[in-house]
Image (cartoon, rainbow, N blue to C red):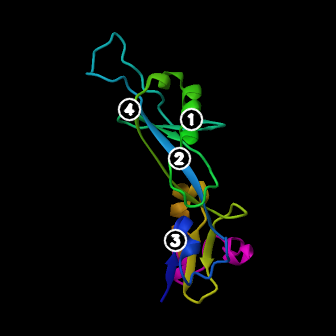
Amino acid sequence: GAVLLAAGAWAGLVEGSSLPAGAVRPVRGQMVVLEGRPPGPPVQPARPIPPIASRVVFSPQGYLVPRPDGRVLCGSTMEEAGFEKAVTADGMRRILAMAVETAPRLAAAPYVESWSNFRPATADGLPILGPGAIPGLFYSTGHHRHGILLAPASADLLAASLLGETPALDLAPYSAARLG
């Protein structure tokens, strides 16, 4: 008896969503992956070569995410490019400049891969959560760059709302109605 619309940046394109025009827009983010460990066969140096970092490193221009296999995820851009899914020279240049400035050893790191995708953004930066204008329709979108972090809390709030229970947080400030 209920439908949850959780279509990310595409939520506003779902026919019958009843979302106000422009309520959710895509913001392109590009990522680059570098090999953080020296190439070639493992050697037994006098001292082991430490990883680039043991945890996520943030800078004003981006972040580095070290992976257990030695790769380093470098990100990310935030671009108003519509649904143009592309990795651009300028995006890679900015990400790589940040990576090398933050961890100079990465200047010699081999390139592994890159990609882009879209973050669902709203005009006021808040997600759209809770019941929609149509009975039985609920929204969970617009989390922008914090979607992966907010997913568990959003799921708990929406599960309560879908089941007719009172969510642990008032969802009124996150209503789609605020945007149109």
The first of marks 1 and 2 along the sequence is 2
Q: CA distance from mark 1 to mark 3?
A: 33 Å
Q: Give the residue at mark 4.
A: 70
Identity of the residue drawn at 56% across and 65% down: 9
Vertically, is 52 above or below 118?
A: above
Q: Which residues are magenta?
A: 159-180
Q: Nearer the viewer, mark 4 or mark 1?
A: 1
Residue that mark 3 sits on = 6
Q: Position of residue 131 (x, y in %)?
A: 61, 81
Q: CA distance from mark 4 to mark 2?
A: 20 Å
Q: Earlier in the sequence, mark 4 or mark 2?
A: 2
Instruction: Measure how far apart labels 3 and 4 are at the Cα level.
Output: 33 Å
Q: Which residue is mark 2?
A: 30
In the image, what residue type sits under mark 2? Gln
Q: Is residue 53 magenta?
A: no
Residue, disc 1 = 93
Q: Is residue 143 above or below residue 159?
A: above
* Kind of residue indicated by mark 3: Ala
User: Camera-side residue: 172 or 112?
Assistant: 112
Upstream in the sequence, badge 3 or badge 4?
3
Look at discs 2 and 3 and give the one toward the viewer: 2
Task: Say which quarter of the image contains residue 165.
Answer: bottom right
> Could you say whether the residue bearing mark 1 is in a helix, strand or loop?
helix
Helix, strand, or loop for circle 4?
loop
Classify mark 1: residues with Cα within 10 Å, few (<14), some (14-19) or many (20+).
few
Q: Amino acid at mark 1?
A: Arg
Percent from the top left, x then y, of residue 139? 57, 75
Q: Is residue 13 above or below residue 32?
A: below
Task: Give the amino acid type for the residue marked by disc 4 in the picture.
Answer: Gly
Q: Position of residue 18 (x, y in %)?
A: 62, 82
Residue neighbourhood size for the residue with mark 2, other residues' Cα within 10 Å, grouped as few (<14), some (14–19), many (≥20): many
